[in-house]
Image: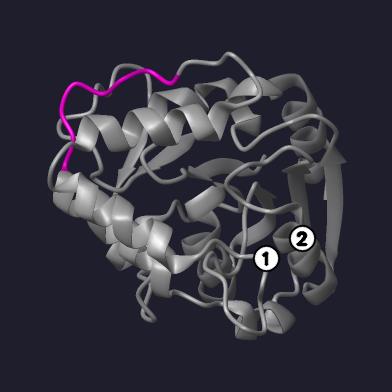
Amino acid sequence: MLKHIIFPGWAVPGECYKTLSPDFIADYGFFKAPDKNDINYIDSSLGLLLDDEFPRSILPQEDIILTAHSLGSLPALRATLICPNIQALVIISGFAKFTASPDYPNGKPEPGINMMQGMMGLSPSMVLSRFYKEMTRPSDYRVPTPYKTNNAELKQGLEYLKTLDLRAILSEINIPVTIIHGTEDAIVDLKLAEFLNKNIKSSTLHIIEGAGHALPFTHTKECLEILHNAKNI
């Protein structure tokens, strides 16, 4: 039985991903003192997960299926090249590069991220409120509001979104990769998912009509069905 690990998106509390029945959820430290309850967290900074010398000991030593949502796709893509026990990868609303560039016009404009970073120093609650509204539309899903944020880590997460470009490693990925994306995603353009699908040779793209960026929470049933098939590698 594969261990199911989830790498969350930016500023999304780990508890939201309980809908996907994971064995472990990575905790980047975006929120202080997360409520552990019945969630098994992997405590690691995002920086460590993105390091070139990604320590294999962070993840369970059993065979793994790794699910990554949004920002989580960056450390997940890198991990597949470092951890041989990762047998399959599921990318939900993800990308290999978030920001736009002349050769990648469908990414997000960098000035928007700069503005979010600046506002994090003034009103983190306003930044998160606006982000959650954009992430969840067109659904009425409400993201649980964490009681205390680690603003430095959240700003660093935005910096990774702004600067990281993992397009060059996509051709090196040899495990099965399942990509799930919504047609109404207001955060990550569908063309970024199509780019992943085009450049990862063992990938399959599932497009969910009418869905936004918060697929694990707004379209849980569809994600679970696709995830179940991905586990049967």
Q: Is residue 187 visible?
A: yes
Main secondary structure type of the part rendered in magenta:
loop
| Residue drawn at x 25%, y 60% as measured from the top left | 156
Q: Quick one: SS at disc 2?
A: helix
Q: According to the image, label 1 marks what residue?
A: 106
Q: Which residues are magenta?
A: 143-150
Residue 93 spot, x, y in % from top left? 64, 47
Label 1: few (<14), some (14–19) or many (≥20) C-alpha neighbours in 10 Å: some
Residue 20 spot, x, y in % from top left? 60, 27
Residue 214 spot, x, y in % from top left? 59, 32
Q: According to the image, label 2 marks what residue?
A: 191
Say whether residue 147 is left or right of residue 1. Answer: left
Quarter occupied by the N terminus: top right
The amino acid type found where label 2 is placed reads Lys
| Residue drawn at x 74%, y 58% as measured from the top left | 193
Say whether residue 182 is left or right of residue 147. Answer: right
Residue 222 spot, x, y in % from top left? 79, 26
